[in-house]
Image (spheres, rainbow, N blue to C red):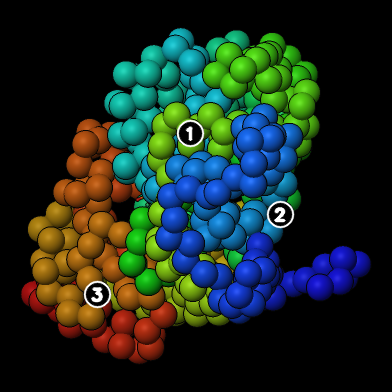
Amino acid sequence: MSDERPLSFDTLQIHAGTEPDPATGARQVPIYQTTAYVFKDADHAARLFNLEEIGYIYSRLTNPTVGALANRIVALEGGAGGFCCSSGHAAQIMALFPLMGPGLNIVASNKLYGGTVTQFTQTFKRFGWEAKLVDFDDPAAVEAAIDDNTRAVFCESLANPAGVPTDIPAIAAISDKAGVPLIVDNTSATPYLIKPIEMGATIVVHSTTKYLTGNGTVTGGCVVDSGNFDWMASDKFPSFSQPEPAYHGLTFGAALGPMAYTFHGIAIGLRDLGMTMNPQGAHYTLMGIETLSLRMQRHVENAQKVAEWLEADDRIESVSYAGLPSSPYHDRAKAISPKGPGALFTVGVKGGYEACVKLVNNLKLFSHVANLGDTRSLIIHSASTTHRQLNEEQQIAAGAAPNVVRISIGTEDPADIIADLDQALAAATA
Ligand SMILES: *Cc1c(COP(=O)(O)O)cnc(C)c1O
């Protein structure tokens, strides 16, 4: 492939990060179902362990199938490097691990996937990490929340559960000024709709479980680094700017430049935390990602049609979809996600909590699951499930009030999706 002419997204999603298998010529990426790799000799082994030569040592750290997937996602996001891990939640811990320590904090959006809110506000406490959740629609509040102990700013590109687009360039300007990296969870948008790195994000995390795989078969995660952050510019990030005691005193920032974050993530993060993706799982996601742009086009087209139909229906109180002109986020969505603001949104149903429960119980085509980004249309009543750990005030702030359901529009025929909603709404509001 030519180095001069950049390949388009549709081509990269099929070709990036892979080449025919050098041993067999296999066209599709083989599933390298192996734990370890034979060293050529003792010197080769030593060079690999010293990061003087790049190669495979042990599959907790790197594996060719998993590496191919990471490289493909890095290419689609426009990053410098990255690595896969066992789930989206693992990706979040892995992304923050080299930046954080006891007594340090992150400033995160209050609109996040419910599981992320719980991970950040409850489980992180055990590590001595703090997450300050603030309203990212208020840049002054984000700026005010950043203090001397802040080591990252964190948000979702299209925030769960309402599909609210975040003003990534504005937030990136604030984190830049404060000298801390911006981490964007790009799960709900995918790089087909939004490229956070182009808008100033430092690091992108994914739950590959969702649209990247696209068919609800495996859990996985990915961390992509832009390579743009100067870790040596302050004393805030000793994992990169100081000799790393966990890696025989190597100073990652000095030795590896823009690849410091990626190599630290693999050589220390995956080595010691062990949140590794398995090659079989990587294979499923590689298969899914080949059709990412085609699926996302259909997802957003369907979401727009269904949202418009719902908004015009008497039984509906509100529809959060940012693709609707009535949404307060409509203009921002056009700027941040011009191909369409995803396929995830919330619907307020007249009749409140009870009607929501009945709606969920009466849908036939929709699956009632705690998932999103499947080819199938999915629904969940967030307040009684994914966001039930939150109090009512937090639920409302997160867009998961008791009277709303979250829907993830699939790639089925939109007329069938609408017909299913129509019959279930009739039953729910009878
Ligand atoms: C699902 C999801 C996660 C968590 O990913 P898992 O693969 O389930 O661990 C994180 N962020 C967002 C936006 C998600 O949708």
Q: What distance separates the C-alpha of mark 2 from that of mark 3?
A: 34 Å
Pointer 2 residue? 78
Q: What distance separates the C-alpha of mark 1 from that of mark 3?
A: 40 Å
Q: If the image is split into quadrants, where does the N terminus sit?
A: bottom right
Q: What distance separates the C-alpha of mark 2 from that of mark 1?
A: 25 Å
- 216 horizontally vs 134: left or right: left
Asked whether the viewer can see residue 111, the reply is no
Task: First in sequence, mark 1 or 3: give its number.
Answer: 1
Instruction: Sort mark 3 into few (<14), some (14-19) or many (20+) by Cα contacts within 10 Å.
Output: many
Amino acid residing under circle 1:
Arg
Asked whether the viewer can see residue 50, the reply is yes
User: Which element is circle 2 on?
Assistant: loop
Residue drawn at point x = 60 percent, y = 45 percent? 39
Q: Foreground mark, 1 or 3?
A: 1
Q: Position of residue 130 (x, y in %)?
A: 42, 19
Q: Position of residue 264 (x, y in %)?
A: 60, 31
Q: Foreground mark, 2 or 1?
A: 1
Viewer-closest of 160 and 346: 160
Q: Foreground mark, 2 or 3?
A: 2
Residue drawn at point x = 24 percent, y = 75 percent? 366
Q: Position of residue 106 (x, y in %)?
A: 50, 24
Pointer 1 residue? 271
Instruction: Sort mark 2 into few (<14), some (14-19) or many (20+) by Cα contacts within 10 Å.
Output: some
The answer to whether 237 is drawn above or below residue 395 in the figure is: above
- 340 horizontally vs 364: left or right: right
